[in-house]
Amino acid sequence: MPKRKFRQFHRPKGMHDILPDEWPYWRKIYKTLSKLSEDYGFSRIDTPILEETDLYLRSTGEGTDIVEKQMYNLKTKGGDYLTLRPEGTPGIVRAYIENGMIGMSQPVKLYYVGPFFRYEAPQHGRYREFHQWGLEAIGGSSPVLDAQIIFVFYIFLKELGIKNLSIQINSIGCKECRPGYRRALVAYYKYKKAKLCSDCRRRLGINPLRLLDCKNPSCQNLAREAPQVLDYLCDDCKSHFKNVLEFLDELELPYFLNPHLVRGLDYYTKTVFEILPEEGKDLRQSALAAGGRFDNLVEFLGGKPTPAVGGALGIERVISLMKTRNIRAEKGKKNQIFFAQLGDLAKKKSLKIIEKLRKSGFSVISALSKDSIKSQLKIANKYEVDFSLILGHKEALEEKIIIRDMNTGIQEVVKLNDLAKKLRQKMRRRKRV
Ligand code: HAM
């Protein structure tokens, strides 16, 4: 038999393990986002991680970075072409149509959270596997929905303790007025092609709006003088945008009109927005949340004409910002205690006592495979629990246990039968201090 070499495997480039240390952030974020989504009337939806490749070609758009460069495509044994979802909106719209949600009371407000995949050059804030929380309101044309989506993302960030945010907003018109703007842009750039980067020269014929948000300095100089979309909006788009801004004013949200904000996906109409940390508002990979209206997508994917608006937030970017701003996630769980044991008899009784505590509502951490009390209490310190329980041989014989206050070091011996009651009293007292 050939000799097998041992080899160590690594995670795929641009993808990450979410280690236990990171989980307090994720837990807090999942908890906050599901509560906020439900409080604002969004219902949870989960769609497959794989969808037909054609879904993204038709909706995200063939001229976009996502479709041109970033999709993980595969061909199944049965000959189907599938893609690891690079974003959520196309799958949600597909599910809306396929499951007959047009028959439900409109708008249908949905939220989702999970992994997404884009084959990008990995860098800070840009990964190949990342997680999004998305909100979509399908079947409503009112500008109040645009404002509500922006507001929910904004207060989510506030609730996590993230301040100094910048909301950038723009309108990119609809199928009535955008062609006129497109023509104006193409005419403007016609004799300036030599000054454009190669990407923009190519994009000019496919999607000239994308030239406005190119980060190349020479393209940025040209974009500054380019015709502005707001001057080309039809009356309907103008009035919609004005209304969205009025709702944002009413909510006292700090927004900025950014005429160069066009977003990289094809399906947007009217409102587009991004929420960024103040310090990163010039960096492309710093948007924490982004989205906009997509009034034509449902029809484009085979449904009835149905207006819609939504957005998505990048969870890794939020966590990274919390860390750089020293915002702590929840420490430990509520009612968390540590259980330590010493001696064979105590160890034997441990599992039963822990289960009894769990049933009484406590979350019990232990290190049952360890024998030394010192090393067990070291672990208790790491978890920052307020109370540890110590069961020694003597206590095990007498049906008693020691409660140790980890902040003061004071210990009290209590009867096992009184343990849950005593612990609750101590925890209540601690909260009051
Ligand atoms: P998006 O701007 O492509 O929009 O992504 C939304 C958010 O996901 C970004 O603002 C960012 O926080 C995060 N994100 C995107 N790509 C990466 C990456 N490679 N690494 C880390 N985070 C990333 C959409 O996906 C649209 N589907 C949003 C939407 C929903 N529009 C309407 N409804």
Image (tube, rainbow, N blue to C red):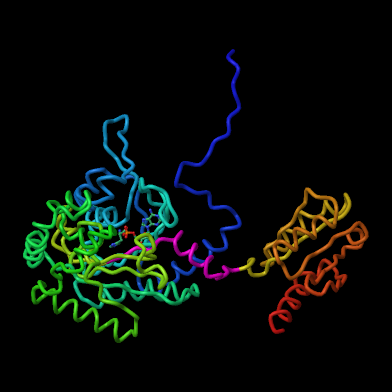
Magenta stretch, residue numbers: 310-330
Picture quadrant where residue 317 is located: bottom left
Location of residue 433 in the rendering, given as x and y in whole percent from the top left corner: 72, 84
Above or below for 176 versus 370: below
Q: Quadrant of the N terminus?
A: top right
Above or below for 287 versus 256: above
- Left-right relation of 262 to 15: left
- Left-right relation of 314 to 273: right
- Asked if the stretch drawn in magenta spans residue 228, the answer is no
- In front of the other: 328 or 211: 211
- Left-right relation of 114 to 265: right
- Name the outermost residue toward the top: 1
Picture quadrant where residue 183 is located: bottom left
For the point 36% across and 69% down, the residue is: 281
- In front of the other: 39 or 19: 19
Above or below for 6 versus 118: above
Location of residue 297 in the rendering, given as x and y in whole percent from the top left corner: 18, 58
Can you tell me which quadrant of the image ligand 1 is in? bottom left
- In front of the other: 91 or 146: 146
For the point 31% across and 43% down, the residue is: 83
Location of residue 332 in the rendering, given as x and y in whole percent from the top left corner: 64, 66
Location of residue 351 in the rendering, given as x and y in whole percent from the top left corner: 76, 53
- Asked if the stretch drawn in magenta spans residue 321, the answer is yes
- In front of the other: 63 or 303: 63
